[in-house]
Image (cartoon, helix red, strand yellow):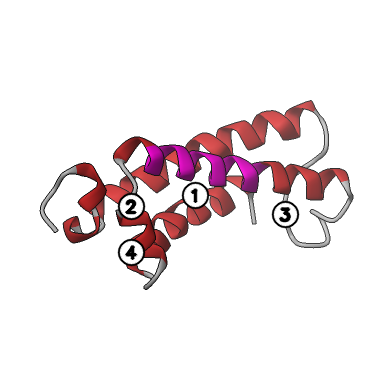
Amino acid sequence: MTADLLSTISGALLSLGFSYLPGASDWFSRLDGTRKRLLMLALLLLSTLAIFGLACAGWAGELGLAVTCDQPGALGLLRAFLLAVMANQSAYALSPQANRRGEGQAA
């Protein structure tokens, strides 16, 4: 599995999870739009850094991740991070309007 694919999937799943999972969706809907975007950005950055950490620890290959602990690997993860942000925001745009109370829309 490539880092691009993994990060794209994780970006979409994070957004869908915070839109549909009970508890998480209720908590997330109370945040304003800026806090929602910053939280998603932080979680995606954390997952990207975790993948790079796995590569540097030598575990990425064992987990089927095609990531290396060097400059090309870091640049590849930067690209994957940007793809994850795009997937996350796309999934958010497609998620139900009812869960966006924190942005001033009708509940």
Taking the image as shown, residue 83 lies to the left or right of residue 50, namely left
Counting the numbered discs, the total is 4
Across and down, in percent, residue 101 comes to 21, 52
Q: Is the residue marked by circle 4 packed among few (<14), some (14-19), or many (20+) residues within 10 Å?
A: some
SS of the residue under disc 3: loop
Q: CA distance from mark 2 to mark 1?
A: 10 Å
Q: Is residue 85 magenta?
A: no
Q: Is the residue marked by circle 2 packed among few (<14), some (14-19), or many (20+) residues within 10 Å?
A: some
Taking the image as shown, residue 14 lies to the left or right of residue 62, namely left
Residue in view at x 40 percent, y 55 percent: 15
Q: Quadrant of the N terminus?
A: bottom right
Instruction: Indicate which disc, 3 or 2, sits on the residue closer to the N terminus.
Output: 3
- Image position of 65 with respect to 35: above or below: below
Residue bearing mark 1: 8
**Which amino acid lies under the numbered mark 2 shown in the image of this protein?**
Ala
Q: Is the residue marked by circle 3 packed among few (<14), some (14-19), or many (20+) residues within 10 Å?
A: some
Do the residues bearing badges 1 and 3 touch, measured as CB atoms within 8 Å?
A: no
Instruction: Indicate which disc, 1 or 3, sits on the residue closer to the N terminus.
Output: 1
Q: CA distance from mark 1 to mark 3?
A: 14 Å
Identify the magenta region. Answer: 35-48
Tell me, for residue 89, which label it has, or none. Answer: none
Taking the image as shown, residue 42 lies to the left or right of residue 36, namely right
Residue bearing mark 3: 65
**Which amino acid lies under the numbered mark 3 shown in the image of this protein?**
Leu
Tell me, for residue 91, which label it has, or none. Answer: 2
Instruction: Indicate which disc, 2 or 4, sits on the residue closer to the N terminus.
Output: 4
SS of the residue under disc 4: helix
Residue in view at x 80 percent, y 50 percent: 54
Instruction: Indicate which disc, 2 or 1, sits on the residue closer to the N terminus.
Output: 1
Do the residues bearing badges 4 and 3 touch, measured as CB atoms within 8 Å?
A: no
Residue bearing mark 4: 26
